[in-house]
Image (tube, rainbow, N blue to C red):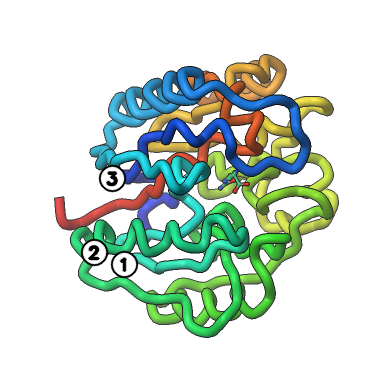
């Protein structure tokens, strides 16, 4: 049987430009507004890094009515097999799904709707080679997670529902995939035992927001504000690309949030 493609191999991503309203993005604790210029610069550098990593980037226009719409990972999920339209768990973000839908219908042959009435955010979904892990959080409820499992069944993707530590926005706020056998995780998430089947690299204490890193093809993108994590991954043999996340960090976002990533067999 042919080996499945590594879960971090991508040739396509979709991003959405930040709106001026991004300064009003949702956040759990107020550490001051990000600046529009700062977010835009971080977004531009991200797009460049993606192109350098060998990915075709589709850039969608900003949506002023949706301050958090730059975080395009949350209203949908994408795979080689097709796309899934989700129902974000924050009231101000629910309609972002309708905004992304026409693009996904154009780019994917199969587009599924999350059935039922539950909620699920893409930030709670970690796609690994063996299964799709769905974290329950304040944004993803059990009904939504189970509805998502029904969609994933249609793509023949195994899935499992797991827990997100209390007070953590999304499952992937605290972890990322480094390769098919290895995850980068905060200590608090690793202690829950969800990554028993993986090698685990634990984030140094105090650098927890670095856990939302992003492996894309040969490189691992990591927030540049986290030198100890960068050094640790570098020593472990990963090719690290540091990217500034200071401004998006003020509205609880990290590197995975800014793209929908998949391997398209149509290009
Ligand atoms: C929100 O609270 O929805 C945004 N301010 C941050 C979303 C981050 N997205 C992600 O982790 N996938």
Q: To which quarter of the image does residue 33 belong?
A: top right
Q: Earlier in the sequence, mark 2 or mark 1?
A: 1
Labels 2 and 3 touching (C-beta < 8 A)? no
User: Disc 3 marks which residue?
Assistant: 12
Looking at the image, which residue is at 52% across and 73% down? 158
> Is the CB atom of the residue marked by disc 1 within 8 angstroms of ligand 1's nearest atom?
no
**Neighbour tally class for label 3: few under 14, some 14-19, many 20 plus, Cα within 10 Å:** many
Could you tell me if residue 83 is visible in this image? yes
Q: Is residue 243 visible?
A: no
Distance from disc 2 to disc 3, alpha carbons, whole Å, reads 12 Å
Q: Is residue 157 above or below residue 12?
A: below
Would residue 94 be found to the left or right of residue 79 on screen? right
Answer few, some or many: residues within 10 Å of disc 1's Cα (few below 14, many 20 plus, some between 14 and 19).
many
44 horizontally vs 188: left or right: left
| Mark 2 crowdedness (10 Å alpha carbons): few <14, some 14-19, many ≥20 | some
Whole-Å distance between the Cαs marked 2 and 1?
6 Å
Instruction: Where is residue 5? Give x, y as percent.
Output: 36, 54
249 lies left or right of 98: right
Q: Quick one: 21 or 185, which is closer to the camera?
A: 21
SS for callout 2:
loop
Nearest to N terminus: mark 2 or mark 3: 3
Residue to which mark 1 is pinned: 82
Location of the N terminus (image quadrant): bottom left
Where residue 153 sits: x, y (%)? 46, 80
Left or right of 121: which side holds 157?
A: left
Question: Dots 2 and 1: beta carbons under 8 Å?
Answer: yes
Q: Are marks 1 and 3 in contact (CB under 8 Å)?
A: no
Q: Which residue is tagged 2?
A: 108
Of the pair 170 and 1, the residue shown nearer to us: 170
Residue at 67 percent across and 22 percent down: it is 232
Foreground pick, 166 / 250: 250
């Amino acid at each position: 049987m042919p080996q499945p493609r590594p879960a971090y191999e991508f040739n396509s991503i979709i991003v959405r430009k930040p709106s001026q309203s991004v300064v009003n993005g949702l956040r759990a604790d107020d550490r001051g507004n990000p600046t529009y210029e700062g977010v835009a610069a971080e977004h531009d550098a991200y797009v460049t890094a993606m192109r350098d990593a060998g990915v075709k980037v589709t850039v969608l226009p900003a949506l002023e009515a949706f301050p958090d719409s730059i975080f395009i990972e949350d209203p949908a999920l994408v795979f080689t097999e097709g796309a899934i339209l989700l129902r974000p768990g924050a009231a101000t973000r629910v309609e972002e799904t309708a905004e992304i839908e026409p693009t996904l219908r154009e780019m994917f042959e199969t587009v599924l709707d999350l059935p039922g009435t539950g909620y699920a955010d893409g930030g709670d979904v970690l796609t690994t080679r063996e299964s799709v892990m769905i974290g329950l959080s304040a944004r993803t409820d059990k009904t939504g997670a189970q509805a998502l499992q029904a969609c994933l069944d249609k793509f023949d993707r195994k899935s499992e529902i797991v827990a997100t530590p209390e007070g953590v926005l999304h499952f992937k706020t605290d972890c990322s995939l480094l390769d098919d056998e290895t995850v980068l995780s905060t200590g608090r998430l690793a202690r829950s035992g969800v990554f028993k089947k993986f090698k685990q690299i634990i984030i140094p204490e105090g650098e927890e927001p670095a856990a939302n890193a992003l492996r894309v093809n040969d490189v691992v993108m990591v927030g540049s504000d986290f030198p100890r994590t960068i050094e640790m991954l570098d020593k472990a043999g990963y090719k690290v690309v540091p990217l500034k996340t200071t401004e998006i960090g003020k509205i609880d976002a990290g590197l995975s949030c800014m793209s929908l990533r998949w391997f398209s067999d149509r290009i």
